[in-house]
């Protein structure tokens, strides 16, 4: 476990960037795969803050009355030579809970 | 010894306070007793519970019994906390790769 305030994940999808863009931005399609809850944060409210053919960015806001967490998830789309799309995901700004865990583990 | 002994021993505020005092170094029952508003037999019972849990050790010298901390006795507690935190971190770590897998699934269905 590192102190980094971002988490990344990557995958290649067998569909052109335009289709992937659609699945990332069309609310009906997004609802089919993107969870409304993030482990460690809880239920999040999603707002699309950036949408270009190469980059889709959502602000994730969570507030349970005791703790508010703001983070962002960014999807970067790159065409692959095979006609598919490489999707790189970065979850950023999620330092509150993660750093607590890291600190507790250090102490142990 | 059963792990529950450690958790049970730590559940009592007086026993936790005793451990904090012993972190400073070895002490006799009367030295420990001086800081609390409880009877000496009650203090002896707390010390016996801490000993049974492996959290303190006793050394006899003449008529005095000296108590000292045994930090290694905390191992069951540490293991529990470590494992508990690991589960949480693991669940979070798995989250985004799983999300991308589902995105893939949605796109595979769109193509059909």
Image (tube, coloured by chain):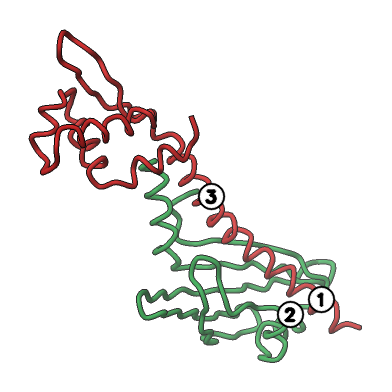
Chain colours: A green, B red
Tell me whether circle 2 and circle 1 mark residues in contact (CB < 8 Å).
yes
Task: Identify the residue position indicated by label 3 in the image.
Answer: B86
Q: Is A5 on the left-hand or right-hand side of B38?
A: right
Tell me the element at label 3.
Answer: helix
What's the residue at 18%, 22% (across, down)?
A: B26
Residue B61: % across, % down: 18, 10
Q: Considering only order in the chain, which callout, 1 or 2, is on the residue closer to the N terminus?
A: 1
Residue B34: % across, % down: 8, 34
Chain containing the residue with disc 1? A
Residue B86: % across, % down: 53, 50
Tell me whether circle 1 and circle 3 mark residues in contact (CB < 8 Å).
no
Tell me whether circle 2 and circle 3 mark residues in contact (CB < 8 Å).
no
What's the residue at 54%, 73% (across, down)?
A: A73
Q: Which quadrant of the figure has residue A37?
A: bottom right
Q: Is B45 on the left-hand or right-hand side of A51?
A: left
Tell me the element at label 2.
Answer: helix
Q: B71 above or below A27? A: above
Tell me the element at label 1.
Answer: loop
Q: A8 above or below A103? A: below
Chain containing the residue with disc 3? B
Task: Identify the residue position indicated by label 2 in the image.
Answer: A20
Q: Which quadrant of the figure has residue B57?
A: top left
Task: Identify the residue position indicated by label 1 in the image.
Answer: A15
Q: CA distance from mark 2 to mark 1?
A: 7 Å
Chain containing the residue with disc 2? A
């Amino acid at each position: 476990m590192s102190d980094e305030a971002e988490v990344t994940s990557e995958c290649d999808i067998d569909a052109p960037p335009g289709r992937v863009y659609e699945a990332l931005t069309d609310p009906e399609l997004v609802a089919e795969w993107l969870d409304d809850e993030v482990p460690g944060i809880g239920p999040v409210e999603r707002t699309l803050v950036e949408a270009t053919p190469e980059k889709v960015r959502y602000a994730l806001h969570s507030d349970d009355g005791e703790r508010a967490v703001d983070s962002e998830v960014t999807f970067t789309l790159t065409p692959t030579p095979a006609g598919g799309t490489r999707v790189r995901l970065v979850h950023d700004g999620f330092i509150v809970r993660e750093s607590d865990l890291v600190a507790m583990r250090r102490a142990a | 010894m059963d792990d529950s002994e450690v958790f049970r021993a730590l559940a009592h505020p007086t026993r936790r306070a005793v451990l904090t005092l012993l972190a400073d170094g070895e002490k006799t029952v009367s030295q420990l007793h001086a800081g609390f508003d409880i009877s000496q037999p009650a203090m002896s019972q707390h010390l016996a519970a801490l000993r049974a849990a492996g959290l303190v050790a006793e050394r006899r010298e003449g008529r005095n019994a000296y108590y000292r901390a045994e930090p290694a006795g905390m191992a069951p507690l540490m293991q529990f906390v470590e494992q508990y935190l690991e589960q949480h971190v693991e669940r979070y770590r798995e989250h985004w790769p799983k999300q991308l897998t589902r995105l893939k699934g949605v796109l595979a269905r769109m193509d059909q």
